[in-house]
Amino acid sequence: MNQPKSRGTRSSFPMPNNATLGAVVAVVAVILGFLILKSVSSDGGSGSVTPPVDTVETPTTLDPAAPPVVTVPTLTAFKVQIANASGVAGSAGKLTLEMQSLGYVTQPALNVAPGTPKRQVTGVFYLAGCEANAQNVAERLGSSPEVGAMPTPLPLETGTLREACVLILLGTDIAGKTLPGATAAGNGTASTDTTTTVAG
C-alpha cells in the first residue's frame, strides 16, 4: 500500500520575495535620509545634532544689603477709633494724630462712656473680618496691648463705632507717650477727649 508522502509544513504567512524586501528597505532609507537632511539644515548646516537643553529660570538675585520685604495690611483699607480710657486728658486726641501721621485712617477721638473703669493696659478690639488689622495696630502700639473681639455693649460715650472696625481703648500704659516714628502733626482731625469721663 502506498503511503502518502509527507509534505513540509507551510507558514501561514507568505515569505516576501526579494523585490518586495528591497523596496521596503529603499523607502526606509529615503525617509531616514530626509529626516537627517532636515535636522542638518535646521541647525545651520553644521552637520551635528545638538540635543535640546532644559532651561531653568534663575530667580532675580536680591541685594543682600536691602531690607526684607514685609507685607502689611493696607492702612487706608480700614478705620480706627481711639477712645480715652486712661484718665489722662487729651491722650486719645494725641494718639489719634500720631496714628494719622503713620498712615492710619482714624475717626475723631472719643472718651469712654461715663462709669467705665480706667484701663491700666491699652486694649485693641476688632469687628469680625478686621482681626489682621487689629493685630497690625497692636504691633504698632507696642507694650503688649490686649487684643480681642469687640466688647458689647461698646464702652464709648457715643455708643457707636461709626465706620471703624478697630477700637483702641487707651490705657495708662501708653497714654501721653509718643509712638516710635510718629509725629503729632496728623491731619488736624478734631478730638473730643478734652476731659476724661472715666472712673478713678
Image: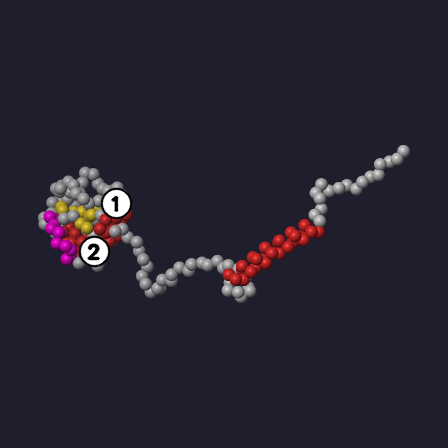
- Determine the residue located farthest toward the top in the rendered image: 1
Q: Position of residue 93 (x, y in %)?
A: 14, 51
Say which residue label 1 marks.
130
Q: Quadrant of residue 197?
A: top left
Q: Position of residue 181 (x, y in %)?
A: 21, 59
Q: Quadrant of residue 184?
A: bottom left
Q: State the residue at coordinates (38%, 62%).
A: 61
Give the SS element for disc 2.
loop
**Span of residues in magenta:** 184-193
- Left or right: residue 62 versus residue 22 is left
Q: Earlier in the sequence, mark 2 or mark 1?
A: 2
Q: Determine if the magenta segment contains residue 12.
A: no
- Determine the residue located farthest toward the front in the rendered image: 19
- The amino acid sitting under disc 1 is Cys
The answer to whether residue 123 shows anywhere in this view is no
- Determine the residue located farthest toward the right in the rendered image: 1
Say which residue label 2 marks.
102
In the image shown, does 87 or 10 lie closer to the viewer? Answer: 10
In the image shown, does 154 or 59 lie closer to the viewer? Answer: 59
Q: Position of residue 79 (x, y in %)?
A: 20, 47
